[in-house]
Amino acid sequence: MRFFQPQKYFWKILTTIGVVSIVFQLITISTLAYFMVLPLGQRATDDLASVMVHGAETWQALSSSKRQAFIEKMNNRHDLLMTSADKPLEVTSSFLPYFYYLEKSLYKQLGQTILIKQNQAEDGEEWFWADIPVSGDTIRFGFPRSRIGVNPPFAFFLLITIGFYLTIITAVKITRRLTVPIERLHQAAQAVGKGHWPKPVKIEGPEELTVLAREFNRMNVQVRELLSNRTTLLAGIAHDLRTPLTQIQLALSMLPNDGGDSKLMESIEEDLGVINNLIGETLSISLELEEEEEVLTDIGQELNIIVNNIQTNETEIHLSHEKSCCQLLHPLALRRIFTNLLVNAVRYGNNKPIKVSYDCNRDEIIVQIIDKGSGIPSEFIEAVFRPFYRLEKSRGSKTGGSGLGLAIVRQLADANKWSVQLLPRPGGGTVAVLTIPLNLNKSVES
């Protein structure tokens, strides 16, 4: 999850609201069913059982001439069909609670268990039957499924389904209202942490979040101005230092040949050259970080130029030519990254051949610079990207660089939303990988 992921935060809130709402609905429906629906159903079955038992007793007491009229009266008034129980029927398999309570009511009325049976009429409607014993006879009472009318399982299913969807829709809207401002702040904070400058975060949501967004926007502007002022200040100091350094170098060159220790003079000139290079690095990085205009750049051509400039008789650099790949990007930053990585490979590659290749696909450009040197221990892979950090501690100009090369590479890559990695090469050495995500609207492949 890293330290915070808005999407997981969104799902946690959504799940909490959804579960609580659904549990509340289930409790509400169960309460209504237990205290209202079931008592009403039980009262209805008690009434029906009384009608059946009373009807059977009345039918038994009537003369044969009046029984048919009574049967029609029961059918018209109570929607009950009376017939003889000479035809066997199957016991009902319905799980409707109504029949359970009807059997229970009949048991209370008659003192014996009466099973509800069922069959299907010619028109396809289900009929349910109860055989009521009376004075040695058995009267069968039947009623259609439509007489019951209610369908509690379907009603409960419908309520739960509709309630579930309404709960989810409401919970999503409420959760999004809470998490969208947090997600925007999260993304903006990540961008600032990588050295990018996002647009001001939209101020919306609860008061606490609007205050947080407003303060974040203010902080973003302050940090950006601070870093810009720092870069300008460093560039100004570096520029101003070049004048006295030039004067010192000029004065040294004007000294007579026997004006001092020759080794000391060479050492001073060497140190002045190192200082001058550091100043040049500072001025260059300031220019590259402030580079605003993107230019359509041919990756293969840039690599070829840099390889030709760095190529020496001591070290061979092999560039694998692939198809031409052009992308709108900041060329100064790209050249500096290529140059620093190649210089590092040459310096620490033990004079063995270096392979440079690039691959351009639909999603990204991947450049690899592979050397066969002693490599970098895994515990120092990230440390070498820190300013002035060197595995070789002598800080001599002949044994190593200034310790700024890889730090500049990482800073320029982050500023352009690229990524750079140093990976161990099987068999020894290092693979420097620069990944440039492609914007398909800006890239041109041929």
Image (spheres, grey):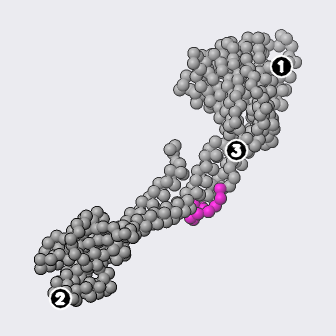
Residue 405 % position (x, y): 69, 28
In the orientation shown, which residue stands out farthest toward the left? 136
Viewer-proximal residue, 400 or 25? Answer: 25
Q: Residues within 10 Å of mark 2 (few under 14, many from 20)?
A: few
- The part of the image, by quadrant, that contains residue 375 is top right
Cβ–Cβ under 8 Å for marks 2 and 1: no
Q: Residues within 10 Å of mark 3 (few under 14, many from 20)?
A: few
Task: Indicate yes or no whether the magenta region holds residue 210.
Answer: yes
- The part of the image, by quadrant, that contains residue 317 is top right
Q: Is residue 196 left or right of residue 102?
A: right
Element assignment for label 1: helix
Name the image quarter holding the C terminus: top right
Q: CA distance from mark 3 to mark 2?
A: 110 Å
Residue extent of the magenta highlight: 201-211
**Tag 1: amino acid:** Leu
- Which label is found at residue 209? none
**Tag 3: amino acid:** Leu
Residue, disc 3: 227
Viewer-proximal residue, 411 or 175? Answer: 175
Residue 43 % position (x, y): 26, 79
Viewer-proximal residue, 359 or 262? Answer: 359
Residue 88 % position (x, y): 22, 66
Name the N-terminal-most of marks 3 and 2.
2
Name the N-terminal-most of marks 2 and 1.
2
Residue, disc 2: 63
Residue 363 in view (yes/no): yes
